[in-house]
Amino acid sequence: MSTTPVDLNDPATDPLRVAGLAAATIAERTGVPRHDVALVLGSGWRGAADLLGETVGEVDSSDVPGFHRAAVEGHAGTLRSVAVGDTGPRALVFGTRAHLYEGRGVRSVVHAVRTAKAAGCSTIVLTNGCGGLNPEWAAGTPVLISDHINLTAQSPIEGPNFVDLTGLYSPRLRELARDVDPSLGEGVYVQFRGPHYETPAEVRMARILGGDLVGMSTALEAIAARQAGLEVLGISLVTNLAAGISDQPLSHEEVIEAGEAAAERCATLLASIVRRLG
């Protein structure tokens, strides 16, 4: 049974109130009153939920206030409550995310982040599939996000709330991730609006600005997470070399294939990291 649709773009709507309603619905449907860590699973990361631990509750995203069905192939349209080991944290796993290019507004894009905070989480792990600017990062390479450049011309923060983004992607959590896998590189993620892929000229611009990874998500979510007081870990999966870095045309099918090929490594990595968050 679906809930009554919520228009997060309505100026009269309080997005934090809707996040509270969503958290309450998740608690009721899963039987889990509180969660510790949230994960947003992007392209290529879907299998991680199965390795985290026992799924004790699962809810269709469209049955939770403010959420919608997955709009992108490679994303799962469910929310899961997962018990990570016997003594590990309780994880709230979002199998899909709202993208800015879907046209539902910035509030929808960051609704999962605000719901995670309302559900009790203190940490959020944001994952994505992206284009790589470093030719040494072959398709299937996970990369830690050290910082981002937001080229969407949007912000999830409303009003005169001046939020410091220094150290947004937690150095402590990046170090923890490297303890799990010392081979992990890190780089600056550049978010474009999408849904079209970046042009070679835009990729060159991103590189000049200091970017290492390009994609269509994550930065706005990370900003909202900082505002909410969540500690953020960002991990990208390089699914292809960005436009102009190689001579191959880009396609979403390539993204899906690279994600599937790297699924086991990504899932194992993410599960190992989350187990250490307890």
Image (spheres, rainbow, N blue to C red):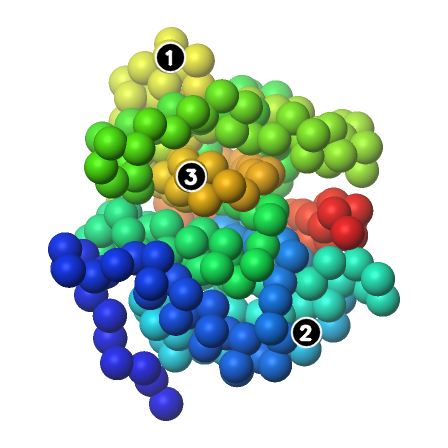
Q: Quadrant of residue 17?
A: bottom left
Residue 45 visible in image: no
Tell me which residue sits at (58%, 70%) in the image: 80
| Element marked by disc 2 | strand
Residue at figure coordinates x 51%, y 41% from the top left: 229
Secondary structure under the numbered disc 3 in the rendered image: helix
Residue furthest bottom as drawn: 1
Mark 2 or mark 1, which has the lower sequence index? Answer: 2
Alpha-carbon span between mark 3 and mark 1: 25 Å
Q: What's the amino acid at mark 3?
A: Gln
Residue 245 lies, in percent from the top left, at 43, 21
Q: Residues within 10 Å of mark 2 (few under 14, many from 20)?
A: some
Front disc: 2 or 3: 3
Tag 3 near tag 1, CB within 8 Å: no
Question: x%, y% of residue 78?
Answer: 49, 71
Q: Amino acid at mark 2?
A: Thr
Q: Which residue is mark 2?
A: 55
Q: Secondary structure at mark 1?
A: helix
User: How far, Cα to Cα, is label 2 from label 1?
Assistant: 42 Å
For the N terminus, the quadrant is: bottom left
Q: Is residue 60 above or below residue 131?
A: below
Q: Amino acid at mark 1?
A: Leu
Q: Is residue 51 above or below residue 154?
A: below
Residue 190 percent across, percent down from the top left: 40, 27
Q: Nearer the viewer, mark 3 or mark 1?
A: 3
Q: Closer to the camera, 37 or 235? A: 37
Q: Mark 2 or mark 1: which is in front?
A: 2
Residue under numbered circle 3: 227
Which numbered disc covers residue 170? Answer: none
Vertical arrangement, residue 3 with respect to residue 208, above or below: below
Q: Which mark is residue 209?
A: 1
Residue 91 or residue 74, whichever sits in front: 91
